[in-house]
Image (cartoon, grey):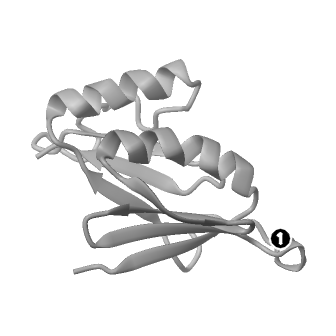
Amino acid sequence: MLHHVEIYVSNLKETIKFWEWFLDDLGYEVFQKWDAGISWKYQETYIVFVQTEERFLDVPYHRCRTGLNHLAFHAKSKEQVDEITLKLKEKGIQILYTDKHPYAGGEDYYAVFFEDPDRIKVELVAP
């Protein structure tokens, strides 16, 4: 069981704006909040976002470098994937792999792929 994931971000305010609606829709609740960070918890697992110190912002994140590539979340249903996809479009958030959506992961893999403000790829997968 995963306990928690901590991610340093370039702009905490933008990160919160991006993630709070998505995590709320998935059933996460704000767990901790302080000046330099926030976490959301679902059952026993939580996700933490922390503002990167200015001195470490010189090299931006890229998911193809060594380190985290993406975060994948369970959806409750294909309908939830569709609902989130609509919300992403309404918010102007680019859907990745639109030519294959919602089967970009394969013919038996119903999901939506997108990126957060730091370009961390996010995936929501139907059961």
Note whether 99 is above or below 66 in the view shown: above
Where does the image place residue 21, in percent across and percent down from the top left? 48, 38
| 15 horizontally vs 87: left or right | right
Toward which corner of the image does residue 78 lie, by quadrant? top left
| 37 horizontally vs 68: left or right | right
| 22 horizontally vs 105: left or right | right
Task: Name the one closer to the observer, 46 or 92.
Answer: 46
At a point 43% along the width and 41% down the height, the residue shown is 22
Q: How many numbered marks does the figure carry?
A: 1
Where does the image place residue 118, in percent across and percent down from the top left? 65, 55
Note whether 105 is above or below 5 in the view shown: above
Toward which corner of the image does residue 72 lie, by quadrant? bottom left
At a point 72% along the width and 50% down the height, the residue shown is 13
Q: Which residue is mark 1?
A: 57
At a point 14% along the width and 36% down the height, the residue shown is 77
Where does the image place residue 91, in percent across and percent down from the top left? 56, 25
Q: Is residue 113 visible?
A: no
At a point 39% along the width and 21% down the height, the residue shown is 86
Amino acid type at circle 1 is Leu
Note whether 21 is above or below 82 in the view shown: below
Q: Residues within 10 Å of mark 1 (few under 14, many from 20)?
A: few
Q: Is residue 100 visible?
A: yes
